[in-house]
Image: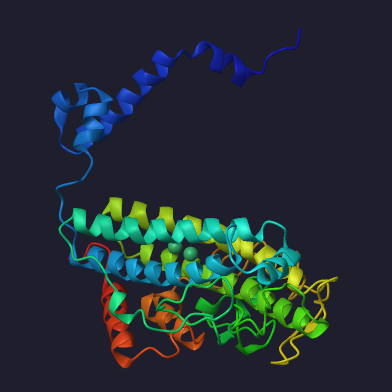
Amino acid sequence: MKEESLSQTIERRQPAQDLANQWHRVIGRRSFLHGAGAAGALLPAGKLLAQDDNNDKKLSKGDAAILRFLAAAEIIETDLWQQYNELGGVNGGNPSYIQALQNLDGDMPQYITDNTDDEISHAAFLNAYLMSKGAQPVNLDAFRRLPSSKATGAKNIGRLTNLLRLDVDTSWWTRYRSMQNPDLGATFPQAVNIRNQPAIPLDDTDTPPSGALTATQTRRIQAIANTAAFHFAFIEQGGSSLYSTLSLQASDVEVLRIVVSIGGVEVDHFSIWHDKAGNAVSTPLAPLTDPESGVTFPVFPQSEDLQPNKILPEPCAFLRPNLPACSVIRPTSTHNAGAVAAVQAFRDDLLFQGQPQAFFDTLMDLATAADAAKRGGD
Ligand SMILES: [Fe+2]
Ligand SMILES: [Fe+2]
């Protein structure tokens, strides 16, 4: 017979009742510390949790501003992910685009659909939470007027975001491979120069519905899919930094819980897309040049700053230069990664190309209020 380990013995001897008792002690202690007193400590755990659900507490101005900006960011994310999903998701309507995405990784359509679902849930939750607290939700419907792709599979509806011509900032690639930190002043070069490039097919010239693509069309659609892969990671690393940054300004613990819980999923997304983008700069897909735009995806060397499979964050300078390097999300300063910085990054990406000034003003008002939120403020 196999000998059991100490932890197995403890587990065997600890019946469920012991765990329940232990849980009561934790709840009781917390309630006592929060002034519920001895009577509160004796209530069943379920009752105490229900009392602790925070439902009647109003949001501070700062917390409402943080959640409102995040709701706007999620509505924007939802809009762009839906465009990717219509063409390249599991039920996507553009076989040539799907094929090019699958050349990067066979699971791309599934990941695109799941990422889209996540963003829809983030936006819906944040607005519902705001309303549950009597706070104003966010609605950007008035600005859904940018054109859709004309390629087979895309719905012909008004959009908030433009994916037909992007300048994709790829410096996140070199930033996460570096031991330097933008919050301590470091800057990073682009990994790939993606300028003026679509991330979805523009029309059926890019992806003939027959699926019979010429060699030139095949290179074109692959370059578009590669651009998408880098753009996915650009968006989600931005979300990772934004949520980490705004979490530092939340006052209420439940608001903090929302921000870190959604933020963790943004990090999860980033990691997946970072891995997929690596296939766009590795053989056999690379080297590749878009025959129309000239955007080129080279084969990246096995060097510290570019190696494709170094997708986990390199430990870097953090907080102060005299502390040891630490593997962290970066940047996380308000200046580099707060709400205003996020709007500016989206704008530089050309994501809002074609939107009127009123759109930026709306977003900037929300962003400024969020960045002004202070932990413990009103
Ligand atoms: Fe999200
Ligand atoms: Fe996201």
Q: Nearer the viewer, residue 60 or 77?
A: 77
Q: Quadrant of ligand 1?
A: bottom left
Depicted 226 relative to depicted 12: above or below:
below
Horizontal side, residue 11 vs residue 275: left or right: left
Answer with the quarter of the image where residue 93 lies: bottom right
Q: Residue drawn 42% across and 91% down?
A: 354
Query: Which quarter of the rendered picture does the C terminus lie within?
Result: bottom left
Answer with the quarter of the image where residue 24 lies: top left
Q: Position of residue 231 (x, y in %)?
A: 59, 75
Q: Residue drawn 48% across and 14% down?
A: 14
Query: Which quarter of the rendered picture does the N terminus lie within?
Result: top right
Give the residue furthest to the top.
1
Answer with the quarter of the image where residue 311 lies: bottom right
Depicted 182 relative to depicted 41: above or below:
below
Depicted 114 relative to depicted 166: above or below:
above
Q: Position of residue 51 (x, y in %)?
A: 19, 36
Q: Position of residue 292 (x, y in %)?
A: 71, 92
